[in-house]
Image (cartoon, rainbow, N blue to C red):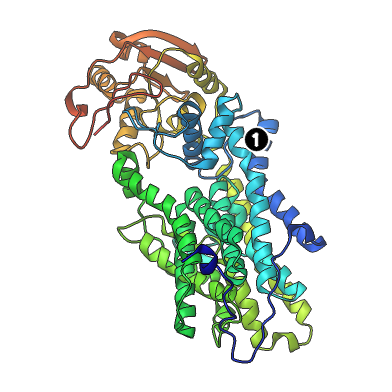
Amino acid sequence: MRAEVELTPAPPILPAPGRTVPRRPLARPGGVDWFEASLLGIFALLSLWVMAVDLWQVVVHGRVWTGTDGIYIVDQMQYLAWIQSAAHHLLSSNLFVLRHTPSDYFMPAITISGGLTALGVAPWLSLLLWKPVAVLTTFLAIRAYAHRSLDGVWERRIALAFGLFFGSVTVIYGSLGTLGDLFPPFLSWGYTFGLMALAAMVFALLAYDRARSTGARRTAWAAALLGGLSSLLHPWQGEMLIIILVGSELAVWWSERRRPRLGLPLLALVGTALPLLYYLILAHTDLSWQLARVESKHSFSIFTILLAVLPLLAPALIAYRGRAASFLAVLTRVWPGAALAIYLVSASSVAATPLHAFEGITIPLAVLAIVGLRRLGFARLPARGAVAALAVVVFTVPGTIYQLRYAARTAAPNPGNPNFITRDEHHALHYLARDPVQGGVLTRFYLGAVVPAETGRRTFVGHCLWSEPGCAARAQLAQRVLDGAMPESTARTMVEQTGARFVLADCKTHSDLDRELAPLIESVRRFGCAAVYTLKPPSPPQGPLAESPRHAALRTSGRQRSRVQYG
């Protein structure tokens, strides 16, 4: 059977017999009105909040900023480390251990940023360049979804406002607050890849709906390619897209009981699933990815999530009554259930980080809530405009203010937070970046998080998803060496067995490393309160750090090359 036959327009589906449902044209970005432009401006300004907080510290207090744009700094350092690695090898490897790790990770945005870094652009800047892309595409995606799903001007505006800024109080680990993963401006603070993946998924759904109604091959391929891009950028969105499409097609088949057309679904599903297959292979063939997946497992209360979305969820449930008016309406109904399915899988032993499943959930819930309120006769209420405006203010402004305050507190200079370092530590890192001697670095945890991003070198410890196994033991070992909290002979033995070529003494170092490491030292460069100790080329690992089948000892022979791991 030819593709032209498989992708022919599907007949009208799901409305009650005899009812004609007009199809809404896909919203065009050029039609942004004053209200929508205002929301885009607010979204863009909010996306710059953490950067503004950091720059305030630089301008007013003269602090040295590491270029991060988020409140959970190690995640941004992870992206910067990947960019540094991609700048050398096209594909990325794990630089948060001193052992050899393969350059086998491909993500298009990281690869492009790596190319820019190879041309001389600072890694932090090549990462920040994705922020306007993420903000604009997310706005356009949510706007397009609202326009395609709803008829009224103000209905669309309200859905867009809630999709971008909805935030309701919930209970998070015993305290009141709002969930950042449900708030797109939060994702713009350092998680631009997740935000772009969400936008790609939404556009893929819209392209799929159009391809299903028109049979256009170009749109069908667009749905498949956008699905694949979403999977590559953030696998959770790719998984979500697959479940939404499969669930929606099954719902239509169950309603109509007619032979399904498989060309479009297979094309979209294969395009979306191929990157997920790549991630699956990566998790089974790369030790770093295996260990990171295990370490990222955690639980998160579904009660917290449901309470957070309850103001939208309650009226949204009413929209499930009766038959869906279009295939896009079916997609919208299936989306929340798909999010719950991804959450349950991620909370199990199969996957990890369950909260990611609900990123973007306010988009379908906002549409469904408006449909539900319409069915309840909200349009006939007096002063309905004032009530709607009040609801938008109540469920967007307080949550936004909470997130801004939380981000400002978290991004402020704190001990052990590597978004700011001392000027002397910065000079030491700059020296390591330019020193032609190859080798990895042993330093304190918080500065180890910065080493790959700033120097392109491997670090003994710095990120407890990637400095595995034994991240806590690594961090404790580095701290005890730099604090002088172990006998000198023991410290020398442990440092030698790590295989590090450099020891970076930060401004909190208390021990006399000149004496402690004297037999190992080749040279010393001092930068005020910081210092870089170049050690003699390491010998093969020994003792408790020796290589074994499951836990290789740590030993590095180059900036991008090494042989061992701490166990």
Q: Position of residue 344 (x, y in %)?
A: 38, 65
Choose top left, top right, bottom left or bottom right for residue 477: top left
Name the residue nearer the viewer: 442 or 454.
454
In percent of width and height, residue 268 lies at 49, 60
Q: Is residue 23 left or right of residue 418?
A: right
Category of crowding for the residue at label 1, using alpha-carbon neighbours closer than 10 angstroms: few (below 14), some (14–19), many (at least 20): some
Residue at 23% x, 34% y is 567
Tell me which residue sits at (64%, 66%) in the image. Answer: 145
Name the one closer to the observer, 103 or 319: 103
Note whether residue 288 is visible: yes
The residue carrying mark 1 is: 57
Residue located farthest toward the front when viewing the structure as drawn: 1
Q: Residue at x 40, y 29 (%)?
A: 444
**Mark 1 residue type:** Gln
**Element on which disc 1 rests:** helix
Q: Is 496 situated above or below 209?
A: above
Residue 75: image location, x then y, percent: 48, 42
Q: Nearer the viewer, residue 23 or 74?
A: 23
Q: How many marks?
A: 1
Q: Residue at x 39, y 36 (%)?
A: 104
Based on the displayed image, in which of its 4 quarters is residue 546 positioned? top left
**Does residue 561 appear left or right of residue 269 in this picture?**
left
Image position of 450 (left or right of 157): left
